[in-house]
Each structure stands twice: as C-alpha cells, then as structure tokens.
Amino acid sequence: GAVVSQHPSWVICKSGTSVKIECRSLDFQATTMFWYRQFPKQSLMLMATSNEGSKATYEQGVEKDKFLINHASLTLSTLTVTSAHPEDSSFYICSASRDSSNEKLFFGSGTQLSVL
Amino acid sequence: GDSVTQMEGPVTLSEEAFLTINCTYTATGYPSLFWYVQYPGEGLQLLLKATKADDKGSNKGFEATYRKETTSFHLEKGSVQVSDSAVYFCALSHGGATNKLIFGTGTLLAVQP
C-alpha cells in the first residue's frame, strides 16, 4: 500500500529555535497534504491543508507565521515551527492524498516535538 | 461545531476478550464515520468506515454500526489478539473536496497474552 514517511519521529529543541518536519509520499504523488497536531489527552486537530504549488489553508486559530508549511513538490511537504516555545510541544502528524477527492488518506507515523 | 468523543484509555484486555470502544459524535447533517488504527511506530490506517445511517463497517474482525438515533459508532471485536494492541481513533467527515477529518482523542488498547 501507499506509504507516507514522516521525519523526524521525535525532536527536542531549545526555546526560540526553529524545527522542520518533513512529510514524503514514497510511492505516489500527493495532490493534497494535511498537517495535524495532538496535545496530550486531546483530539487530533487539523492545522492546515496544503496543495502543491499553492499557499496552505490554515484552520482557525492556527498562526500561519508560526507554522510555516511548504508543499514545493508532489511528494514533499514540510512544516516548520518557528521560534518554538514549550507550549508548541505536541505530537504532529501529516497525511497525504493521492487524488483530489481525498477519499483515501495515508498518514505519517508522527513527530513528537518537545521544546525545552 | 462538529466533534467526536471517544472513551478514554488505556483499555487493557486479556487475549480473546470482547472489545468495545465507545464513540459518539456531534455533527450537522449526515457525516461519514471512520475508525483509524495506529500500530506502534506506524502511521494511522483506515480500519473501517460507514457512510450512512445503519451501515455497518467491518474489517479484520472489527465492526462498527452507524447509529443516527444515538449519534454513535462504537467499535467492537469479539475476540481480541495481542496484535490488536494499538491506538484507535474515531473520526467523522462531511466529505467534499477537502474531506476534512475530525478526530477523537484516540484510545490505547493493550491486549495481554
């Protein structure tokens, strides 16, 4: 089946630094990629939707200047957490769809971010 | 807005026990309902889905029935195995071009031999 690779699986960084998370579709071209965030004991929440070659669409309450999303190719999307703070510590997951219907999504294994 | 509520884990069962993980939802209209499973170190995978009231989704011995009257989509399995240990997410979507998924919190299932 289709595979989505997410890297790194975990990262620890100092407050004020930026962290980049990569999401790659390994055996298909992803027209749309989604980024989610999950705080402990809370729901997995959609942060933004990105389409290749265009600006990401952010959900209400998500700061686009803090969470920079780049979807420069059909197989790669990146999420950069800029000037990270401890409250950004969370579990981040990406998913990718191979067609515009988004009927079938393939998920990465997630990235646990800890900001000290 | 739309939301999904599922039972808090962890759920710990012995092998061959009966499993129920409760899921209820709040949504306008008639969303599609899903169960996703995440095995350790892997991405979420679609386990089963139902797109209209009274539909039953099933896969790998798991079942869930779309109950409009109780706004529920409880996950069941008659006899769990150690290999079923994973995190299970209930979700809903109204479909369409974006097909945004709204997830519950996830429930960790640990099956002991």
Image (cartoon, coloured by chain):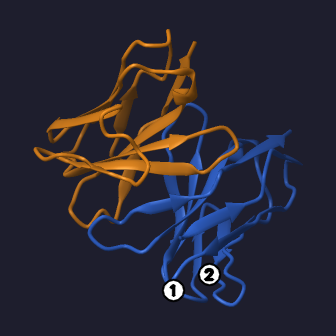
Q: Is residue A93 left or right of residue A20?
A: right
Q: Which residue is mark 1?
A: B52
Binning the other alpha carbons within 10 Å of mark 1 as few (below 14), some (14 to 19) or many (20 upward) gives some
Same chain, marks 2 and 1? yes
Q: Residue at the left extreme? A: A53
Q: Chain of mark 2?
A: B
Q: Residue at the spot x=39%, y=19% of the render?
A: A83
Please state which amino acid type lies under the numbered disc 1: Lys
- Quarter residue A63 falls in: top left
In-front residue for pair A52/A55: A55
Q: Position of residue B62 (x, y in %)?
A: 66, 65
Q: Residue at the spot x=26%, y=69% of the render?
A: B97
Q: How many marks?
A: 2
Q: Is residue B36 above or below residue A54?
A: below
Per the rendering, the colour in which chain B appears is blue
Q: Is residue B74 left or right of residue A38?
A: right
Q: Is residue A65 left or right of residue B24?
A: left
- Quarter residue B18 falls in: bottom right
The C terminus of chain B appears in which quarter of the rendering? top right
State yes or no: discs 2 and 1 in contact (Cβ < 8 Å): yes
CA separation, marks 2 and 1?
7 Å
Disc on res. B87: none
Q: Which residue is mark 2?
A: B66
Please state which amino acid type lies under the numbered disc 2: Tyr
Q: Earlier in the sequence, mark 2 or mark 1?
A: 1
Q: Residue at the spot x=38%, y=30% of the render?
A: A6
Q: Which chain is orange?
A: A
**Is there any visible trace of residue A76 in the rendered image?**
no
**Is there any visible trace of residue B32 in the rendered image?**
yes
